[in-house]
Image (cartoon, helix red, strand yellow):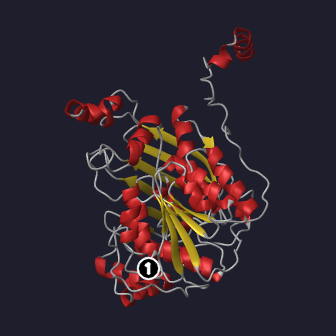
Amino acid sequence: MKNNRREFIKRTGLAGAGIFVGGSRNPENREPFPQTQRQRINMSEYAAPKLETVRVGIIGLGNRGSGTTRAMARIEGVEIKAMCDIIPEKVSAAIASIQDIPQHNPDSYSGSEDAWKRLCERGDIDLVYIGTPWRLHTPMAVYAMEHEIHAAVDRPCAVTIDECWQLVETSERTRRHCWMATRSCLDGIKAVALNMVRKGLFGEIIHAEGAYIHNLNTERYNFSKDQYYDMWRLKENATRNGNLYPESGIDAAAPMMDINYGDKMEFMVSVSGNDFSMKEKAREMAAADPFFEPYVDKNYRGNMNVSIIRTARGRSIMIQHDVSTPRPRPGSHLISGTKGLFRHSPNPAIAFGHEGWLPEEEFQSLVEEYTPEISKRFSEMVRQAGGERYSGYSSVRPMDWRLIDCLRNGLPLDMNVYDAALWSALGPLSEWSVANRSHPVQVPDFTAGAWQTSKRRQDIELEYGGTTKLLRYG
């Protein structure tokens, strides 16, 4: 019967039309994407030549880029040389925001969709920081690396598997870093939890959970004319169905499970429900403003996506994505081991059995005991610089500080191109699984097997480097 069906499809030409097999959707094929390629150099271990001064160009000056500008400007050894945005007023405002810091006198690039290329071509940029719409991330990062510039990219780095491989290939060939901006486990209670995991407090880790839960289905975010250039984020939600922002769900689980450093993701299963609110919101907005009429009949992604990943060592990870229902932030992060577990939210807590969560006093005692060196030293640097922690994008974040510190000390980065590609790949992988009735899909090995021998990153004890200071605020 199976052979007869295949012969029928072949004779009638229906396979090319996508009938019966769904075109490129083939749920019998768990490996629809390239799984590995020859590794030129292991960028996980690669240390670029030291840069006493890191000359920075910033592309994209919206919410992320403008905050990043003020943060990077206050890190020792950084000189912001150039800034770019398609909207000239955003460049002017970003330059004005750092005019009180004398070592920065950036040039302005704007007015055309290709202005960013001129920034990369000028020849005196060491690091370009990219905070543009998602679909520009890979083209800009690749162009920068081709021009001998390290790339720092807001998450996600890529929106297709081909783009993920393109980043890996370009980084290895040019020997330029491709780093993704994610808080990961270098800051706050996540850094404490990572230290607990590494010192065995929870035993062997067997399961993790993470999520990006943030209601963007409002006039302030997705349905704002000003929040996202050319409504790009609403368009992403109207053309894709899966976990569109997996990095915020995986940023704690991956380091705590040593993914790419002793374990790897093996396959993923992803489920999306229907859209119960975005189309309704589009209709509501269009009734009051004709501008939104083109968005009324779009097929928006499901409100909730749940993706489950199995690793090579037989451990599990669950990540969720919901940006269109009124659930409180932040999403939950949980790490579970053979001896206990850590929960990040709604309130950080630890448990060692069915009896329940530890009393607050015991919890705080453990936090004090396991606070890693990076948290202690960074908090002290911020205090000495006259700043405050956790004040939004304008504050200096440990991930940005550590990126510059590694480049100045000639160290491998805590987040490299394999991490950036893998975490970003979970988006398109989830889309494939959702489109194929939640069939499992194999996760590519961007390390080409190096995950078995690469040294662990995320140096939370600052065994190396840590010499870069922060400049005084204000």
Identify which residue is drawn at 59% across, 85% down.
465
- Residue 3, horizontal then vertical, whole percent: 75, 16
Q: Which residue is mark 1?
A: 74
- Residue 5, horizontal then vertical, whole percent: 69, 14
User: Is 118 above or below relative to 268?
Assistant: below
Neighbour tally class for label 1: few under 14, some 14-19, many 20 plus, Cα within 10 Å = many
**Quadrant of the image for the C terminus?**
bottom left
Q: Quadrant of residue 324?
A: top left
Q: Quadrant of residue 404?
A: bottom right
- Residue 65, horizontal then vertical, whole percent: 43, 62
- The residue closer to the viewer here, 196 or 129, is 129
Position of residue 190 in the picture relative to residue 40 (left or right): left
**Quadrant of the image for the N terminus?**
top right
| Amino acid type for the residue under numbered disc 1 | Arg
User: Is 317 above or below relative to 373?
Assistant: above
- Residue 372, horizontal then vertical, whole percent: 48, 82
Res 37 seen here: yes
Total marks placed: 1
- The residue closer to the viewer here, 359 or 165, is 165
SS for tag 1? loop
Position of residue 473 in the picture relative to residue 105 (left or right): left
Identify which residue is drawn at 35% across, 47% down.
323
